[in-house]
């Protein structure tokens, strides 16, 4: 995620004058898998309910326990005139415990029907939890298929610390977007990045509108006054990286290295800086590929929206979404570099727990610094020096390795996170440093990882002990000394 805040625009951060700050392991299968349920005697087994939360220290209620989702098929129909959504979501999963019941995250919408392996299942709601009781208990290790029908008026999610996200009804359609959660406002989901899955989307809207989502575009079909847009993301994706953006757009399409390119800019803003900036997506991606290794997904693109509630950019997988505010001062490829850096760090390599958000934002910030050096606007070292010299006391008092929920998207995570990456580079030297980044992207591709994993890999590649460096930069509450080679 890239944040915008008040102040003069600087090259060292994703800053846009006049835009307010607002924030806002599962399967590693590369595609859909078939359910593998087998008739199994349950008479001698003990069954219990799956956990109603994934146990994340920062967000204990996010996600659910007892199963691992491999694939979602999400089919929704949305009418902006009435703000009503109806949908059917089918998920293929594997039980990781003997389950009498299991939970899914679903905010606000009304469930009309649930089946498990084709048999009618019981269901009940507890706040934003959907509790499913299959007709036959689920045995650990067996696959199962759940189909859920639902409808209603989808709503936004409000976080005191993190801002507004989820399903946002707009003047010409809707935007489903947000971090750390948003997916549960429009489909039932195991809503935590530790359970990544592949996705197919079918989004039906009035035929004069466009519906953009993740992955490869699979075509548009029209029936009467309605059009259905199909999208497919074949690489495992964390649920908060899913998106749908509905409205009127200037759409550009093409091919790059055999992959589809699909970008959309809202017609609410004049043709200009947003279009030019997003059009450089493949150029930026190619540069980052030369640094981080192969681009990890099957499609490229970007979406620009104009809504006062979306004052950030988010690295929605394969097709980031940008607030139009980032382009008010002209072309801005820095924000594009930041969100594309996330395609490697945050999207392909994802978090196990939200505390480690610096792994996403620190590395994406560094991608932005590298791009600025590549384009000649500033060097990485000068950006580090300026950030180090001007960082507020709050940045140094807030350890990015454990920022707390209130500072999850604070400047320490971004600025000090980026400085931590540069401190590592200075300590180990360029050869080892860039090998670390490429190895991290390759070895953890499509998976989940922790800060401890990153430190271990950095020590293995560099053949240096780095615990003191990371302790100071990630967990200390005072400004560390300027970094030096080890």
Image: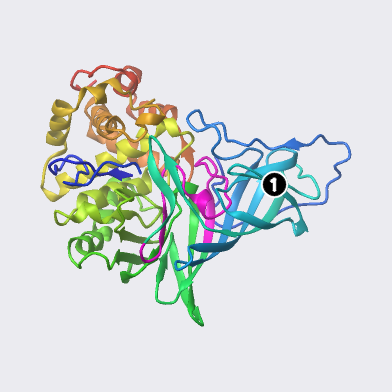
Colouring method of the image: rainbow
Q: Quadrant of the N terminus?
A: top left
Q: Residue furthest front?
A: 82
Q: x, y percentage for residue 243?
A: 43, 56
Q: Nearer the viewer, residue 222 or 11?
A: 222
Q: Quadrant of the C terminus?
A: top left
Determine whether 359 is above or below 284 in the image.
Answer: above
199 in the magenta segment: yes
Residue 275 appears in the rendering: yes
Which element carries disc 1, helix, strand or loop?
strand
Residue 75 appears in the rendering: no
Q: Name the residue at 52% across, 55% down.
A: 186
Q: Residue furthest bottom?
A: 224
Q: Nearer the viewer, residue 421 or 47?
A: 47
Quarter of the image for residue 473 reads top left
Determine whether 21 is above or below 273 in the image.
Answer: above
Q: Nearer the viewer, residue 196 or 460?
A: 196
Q: Name the residue at 29% across, 58% down.
A: 306
Q: x, y percentage for residue 205?
A: 47, 70
Left or right: where 353 falls relative to 455: right
In magenta, the rendered stretch is: 171-200
Determine whether 118 is above or below 128 in the image.
Answer: below
Q: Residue furthest right?
A: 43
Tell me if mark 1 has few (under 14), some (14-19) or many (20+) residues whose alpha carbon lies within 10 angstroms of its own.
few
Residue at label 1? 124
Q: x, y percentage for residue 368?
A: 23, 44
Q: Main secondary structure of the magenta part?
A: loop
Left or right: where 16 falls relative to 444: left
Left or right: where 467 falls relative to 479: right
4 in the magenta segment: no
Q: x, y percentage for residue 478?
A: 25, 17
Left or right: where 8 falls relative to 74: left
């Amino acid at each position: 995620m890239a944040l915008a805040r008040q102040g003069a625009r600087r090259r060292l951060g994703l800053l846009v004058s006049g835009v307010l700050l607002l924030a806002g392991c599962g399967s590693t299968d590369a595609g859909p898998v078939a359910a593998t349920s087998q008739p199994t005697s349950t008479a001698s087994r003990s069954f219990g309910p799956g956990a109603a939360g994934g146990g994340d220290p920062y967000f204990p209620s996010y996600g659910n326990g007892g199963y691992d989702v491999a694939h979602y098929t999400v089919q929704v129909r949305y009418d902006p005139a009435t703000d009503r959504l109806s949908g059917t979501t089918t998920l293929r999963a594997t039980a990781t415990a003997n389950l009498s019941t299991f939970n899914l995250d679903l905010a606000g919408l009304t469930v009309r029907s649930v089946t498990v392996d084709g048999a009618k299942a019981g269901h009940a709601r507890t706040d934003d939890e959907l509790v499913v009781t299959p007709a036959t208990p689920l045995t650990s290790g067996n696959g199962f298929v759940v189909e859920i029908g639902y409808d209603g008026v989808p709503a936004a999610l409000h976080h005191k610390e993190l801002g507004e996200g989820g399903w946002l009804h707009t003047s010409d359609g809707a935007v489903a977007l947000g971090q750390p959660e948003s997916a549960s406002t429009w489909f039932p989901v195991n809503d935590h990045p530790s359970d990544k899955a592949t996705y197919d989307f079918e989004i039906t809207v009035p035929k004069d509108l466009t519906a953009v989502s993740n992955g490869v575009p699979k075509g548009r079909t029209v029936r009467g006054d309605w059009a259905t847009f199909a999208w497919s993301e074949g690489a495992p994706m964390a649920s908060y990286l899913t998106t749908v953006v509905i409205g009127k757009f200037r759409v550009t399409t093409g091919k790059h290295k055999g992959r589809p390119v699909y970008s959309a800019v809202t017609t609410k803003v004049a043709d200009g800086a947003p279009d030019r900036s997003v059009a450089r997506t493949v150029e930026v991606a190619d540069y980052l590929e030369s640094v981080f290794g192969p681009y990890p997904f099957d499609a490229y693109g970007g979406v620009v929206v104009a809504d006062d509630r979306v004052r950030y950019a988010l690295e929605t997988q394969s097709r980031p979404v940008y607030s139009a505010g980032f382009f008010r001062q002209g072309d801005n490829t820095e924000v594009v570099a930041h969100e594309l850096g996330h395609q490697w760090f945050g999207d392909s390599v994802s978090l196990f727990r939200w505390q480690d958000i610096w792994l996403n934002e620190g590395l994406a910030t560094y991608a932005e610094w590298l791009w600025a050096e590549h384009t000649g606007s500033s060097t990485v070292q000068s950006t580090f020096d300026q950030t180090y010299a001007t960082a507020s006391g709050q940045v140094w008092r807030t350890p990015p390795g454990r920022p707390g929920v209130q500072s999850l998207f604070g400047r320490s995570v971004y600025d000090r996170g980026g400085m931590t990456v540069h401190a590592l580079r200075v300590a180990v030297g360029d050869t080892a440093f860039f090998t670390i980044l490429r190895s991290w992207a390759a070895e953890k591709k499509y998976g989940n990882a922790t800060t401890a994993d990153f430190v271990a890999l950095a020590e293995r590649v560099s053949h240096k002990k780095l615990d003191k460096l990371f302790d100071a930069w990630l967990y200390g509450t005072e400004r560390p000394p300027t970094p030096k080679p080890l």
